[in-house]
Amino acid sequence: MSDYKPSDELKAALHALDLAEQELDNRRKAVRAAVANDLKANPRVTNPEMADHLPWTAETVRAIAREYDVPRKRQPTVKAINPKPKQTAGAKSSG
């Protein structure tokens, strides 16, 4: 095992880096919340339109919208492969 111990300079630099990374994470969260709030306040703005003003893609904006429960602009167009048949009133189940 080595006798090496990091210098005070290295310890201070690592501590400063840790603080800066925490601050960056906090600021990134604040920007994501602001994006979600803007999407909620401007329901006609699309994800690609919002992404034009950000360092992120439309897909990232979509993920932010989901994370913050931003209402969808349109209903999903993908349907189940094997949808369950609708049961009419008074019909007996086949089982």
Image: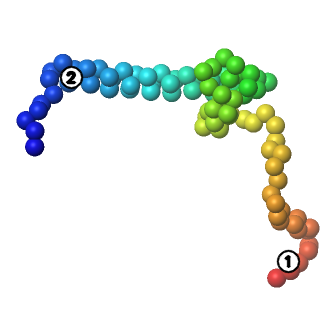
Mark number displayed over residue 93: 1
The quadrant in which residue 91 appears is bottom right
Q: Work out whether 93 lies above or below 60.
A: below
Mark number displayed over residue 15: none
Looking at the image, tell me whether mark 1 or mark 2 is earlier in sequence order: 2
The quadrant in which residue 73 appears is top right
Q: Work out whether 65 lies above or below 34.
A: below
Q: Residue 83: percent from the left, percent from the top?
A: 83, 62
Q: Is residue 8 left or right of residue 53?
A: left
Find disc 2 in the rendering and name its residue: 10
User: Label 1: few (<14), some or many (≥20) within 10 Å?
Assistant: few
Q: Gap in Å between the C-alphas at discs 1 and 2?
A: 73 Å
**Picture quarter with the N terminus:** top left
View extreme (bottom): residue: 95
Q: Residue at x 88, y 78 (%)?
A: 92
Question: Does residue 33 appear in the picture of this structure?
Answer: no
Q: Is residue 80 left or right of residue 30?
A: right
